[in-house]
Amino acid sequence: MLVEALLALAAAGGGAIVQAAGTDAWNGVRSGIARVLGRGEEAREQAELERLDRTRTVLDAASEGEFNRVQAAQAAVWQNRLEMLLEELPDAQRQQAAVEIQNVIERASAVGKEPSVHNDFSGSTFEKSAVQGSGTQHNTFN
């Protein structure tokens, strides 16, 4: 039986996987989780990469009305896979796997947190205007 902290880590890992699908974090999360679950076996890692690709395909195919349900179901699948891995490993390997899972979660959550520009315009009139810059920009015209 896993301790509560490891169960929470597995749940966060499952959530990170589905949140990363379709984002810039996907490749890093995908390879990191496959490496953790593959445990150094190339064939096993490849099988996990294929499972992760199927998850992304399922999420991409979900309609807007069913997306939240599909996302929750896929997160539960990956949570379960991570729990099973952590449960079957000896203590030393379990701790190493937990560190690796945490690193993947952090990688997934770091995407989208780069600096952004936020502009609010109120009571202004614009003609032939343009907003220039790079990165994430949020412009509000009131």
Image: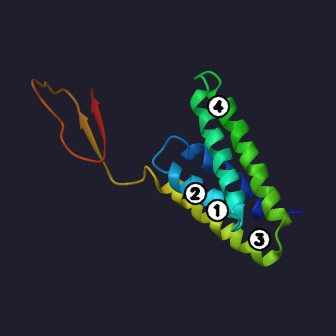
Q: Nearer the viewer, mark 2 or mark 3?
A: 2
Q: Between residues 32 and 1, which one lies in front from this camera angle?
A: 32
x, y percent for residue 79: 74, 50
Q: Residue at left 18%, top 41%?
A: 132
Q: Which residue is mark 4?
A: 68
Kind of residue sitting beneath label 1: Arg
Asked if the residue at tag 2 contacts the one at tag 4, i.e. Cβ–Cβ closer than 8 Å, the answer is no
What is the distance, in whole Å, between disc 3 and disc 4 at their CAs?
31 Å
Query: Which mark is first along the chain, 4 or 3?
Result: 4
Q: Residue furthest front?
A: 43
Query: Which mark is first along the chain, 1 or 3?
Result: 1
Q: Residue furthest left?
A: 128
Q: Which disc is residue 31 wearing? A: 2
Secondary element at tag 4: helix
Q: Which disc is residue 94 wearing? A: 3
Q: Residue 107 vs residue 87: left or right? A: left
What is the distance, in whole Å, between disc 3 and disc 1 at their CAs?
14 Å
Q: Residue 60 vs residue 40: left or right? A: left
What is the distance, in whole Å, between disc 2 and disc 3 at their CAs?
19 Å
What is the distance, in whole Å, between disc 4 and disc 2 at their CAs?
24 Å
Q: Residue at left 66%, top 54%?
A: 46
Q: Nearer the viewer, mark 3 or mark 4?
A: 3
Q: Between residues 2 and 88, which one lies in front from this camera angle?
A: 88
Q: Nearer the viewer, mark 4 or mark 1?
A: 1
Q: Which residue is mark 1?
A: 35
Q: Nearer the viewer, mark 3 or mark 1?
A: 1
Query: Which mark is first along the chain, 2 or 4?
Result: 2
Name above or below for residue 124 compared with residue 20: above
